[in-house]
Amino acid sequence: MLDYKATNLILVPAKDTSQACDGCGAKDERSRDRRTRANFRCVVCGHAAHADLNVAKSILALALDGRAGKDEMPGLAHLHGACAGILY
């Protein structure tokens, strides 16, 4: 649907992106706030962010890293340095 607007469209599957940490790439459903689902705190590295921002960065990382359609989540650590729990 959007391919006519874009010069470069990368399709990224949504599966498990809301559970993946944009800092370290770990996937764990416990990282999402069970009450509001609005907050994300990685149970592996401690990275904290608004859940929507975290998932957007996870999807971006998949697209930029050329891993769209694959199971692993690379995280953004390779783009911004080590995960420090800081919002960019």
Image: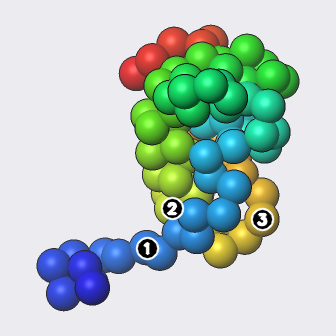
Q: Residue at x 45, y 18 (%)?
A: 87
Q: Residues within 10 Å of mark 1 (few under 14, many from 20)?
A: some
Q: At label 2, which amino acid type do we have?
A: Ala
Question: Which one is closest to the eye, mark 3 or mark 2?
Answer: 3
Mark 1 or mark 2, which has the lower sequence index?
1
The span from disc 3 to disc 2 (Cα, nearest Å) is 13 Å
Q: Which of 46/23 is in front?
A: 46
Residue that mark 3 sits on: 71
Which percent across, then down, holds residue 54? 52, 35
Q: Residue at x 72, y 70 (%)?
A: 70
Residue that mark 2 sits on: 63
Mark 3 or mark 1, which has the lower sequence index?
1
**Colour theme:** rainbow
Q: At label 1, which amino acid type do we have?
A: Ile
Q: Residue furthest front?
A: 35
The reply to whether residue 63 is in sight is yes
Secondary structure beneath disc 2?
Answer: helix
Which percent across, then down, holds residue 26? 79, 38
- Quadrant of residue 84 within the rendered picture: top right
Q: Which of 65/37 is in front?
A: 37
Across the whole image, how many numbered discs are drawn on residues?
3
Q: Residue at x 55, y 27 (%)?
A: 36
In this rendering, the answer to whether 64 lies above or below 27 is below
Given contact means CB atoms under 8 Å apart, are the residues at marks 1 and 2 in contact? Answer: yes
Residue that mark 1 sits on: 10
Which percent across, then down, holds residue 58? 56, 46
